[in-house]
Image (cartoon, rainbow, N blue to C red):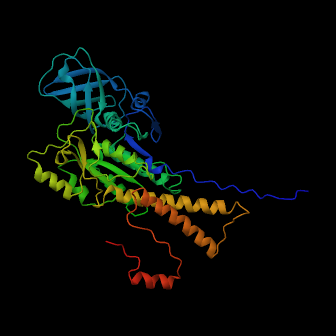
Amino acid sequence: MAIVNINVSVTNPPKPSQLLKSGAMISMGGTTLNAGEYQLLTSETDLADILAPAKTISTLAWATGVVTVTLAAAHGWTNGSQVPVIISGATPAGYNGAYTATVTGTNTFTYPLTTNPGTATAMGTVKTVVQNEISQMNTSFWAQGKTRAVYVLELGDVSMTDAVEALTTFIAEDVSLGNTYQKFFSYLVPREWDSVAEFKTLTGLYTSPGSLVYFFVTSTIATYEAWTATKNKTVFAGVEAPDIPASEFSMAGPFQSSLANDPGSSNMVPPMSYRFMYGLTEYPLEGNSALLKSLQDSNINYIGTGAEGGLSNKVLFTGRMLDGNPFNYWYSVAWTEINLELDLANEIINGSNTTVNPLYYEQKGIDRLQRRALKTLRNGISYGLILGRVIDTQLTQEDFNTEYDKGTYAATP
């Protein structure tokens, strides 16, 4: 028989949550994924493996200002609907360009074209504008750097309202079991969703302080005021410069920057306002000073320059959500919520699996959990997420109320 018996207890630290680093770019028929499927992209070239091919055109015929297009296969669009499309690869080149098509049959549509380009000798291909946006998102996302992977969430080649409905269902399922099992923290949505009423409704479903769902939205000068009126804390809205390149999707810049945060004591989280943006086009300053001030006052973001600081870099103005709070405000709230739950649950579970130092529901156990929460919050301070100080007290509720009313815990100037 042994002289000494050793009780062995293993305390396992929690695996860090990856939710705040997880976002999805919304595709509407731009990939070969099935509707509702998502895939991780770890580099800019990964999208090419799942990019949907353009639809093949069989015939192009111009007559009295209208081009009739026949496809080699059914397009799947609703008859009589209007669909923004991009024609490319046709000869003569006058057929190519971006147009609003009117669907006339299962594999036909028309679009207006004033001048007759001549008889078509090469038919080319067609994509919807929104299908093409996933490529723009991908290009502008990776232009910011290679530090963060991103998901593509495919909703299918459907109408805008159907796509919003699909995302509504997806998010409801995603958040149903809590943040431990939630897949995505934020979504980069197509430009066309700007004026979809159902999408505004969706963004309003997650405005409670504890909700961990956010949207990066591209608006326009003509429509941004409707977004400002919502004051939804879930929306990071912005407008693009008037003459951006065909490959650019400006809001992919701040979307990537928001996911690139990696809080740590040696890697603090900087303000979202004035962060450098790469490969994006600044909004022209000349003649637009009043407009840009209005955008800032309305909590609408845009790409500018660091000229005031003697820098030629493109920077983000001004990094705010529609409720007027900086992005960092709600990011810090989310970090605190996620990590308090994670660390306290870890303490409780480990406390149920040790005979050396079990956790009981008594004052000592409560004090132990409080100390664990205190450590988490102090980490938040060192990471640049929580401002001020965290004070540990062990008072009765009555004594705490007395000290609170006296201003004992008031912030120091």
Task: Point out the residue furthest to the top here.
Answer: 121
Q: Quadrant of residue 229?
A: bottom left
Quarter of the rendering occupied by the C terminus: bottom left
In this rendering, does residue 211 appear at all? no
**How far from the left and from the top, in percent, is residue 180?**
53, 54
Quarter of the rendering occupied by the N terminus: bottom right
**How far from the left and from the top, in percent, is residue 321?**
30, 56
Residue in the picture at 40% in, 49% down: 186
Q: Nearer the viewer, residue 266 or 338?
A: 266
**How far from the left and from the top, in percent, is residue 254?**
31, 46
Q: Is residue 330 above or below residue 93?
A: below
301 left or right, relative to 134:
left
Q: Quadrant of residue 105?
A: top left
Q: Is residue 342 above or below residue 312?
A: below
Q: Nearer the viewer, residue 180 or 374?
A: 374
**How far from the left and from the top, in percent, is residue 45?**
40, 29
Task: Point out the residue furthest to the front here.
Answer: 3
Task: Point out the residue furthest to the left here.
Answer: 287
In this rendering, does residue 363 appear at all? yes
Q: Quadrant of residue 355?
A: bottom right
Query: For the image shown, how many numbered marks are present on the structure?
Result: 0
Residue in the picture at 65% in, 59% down: 350
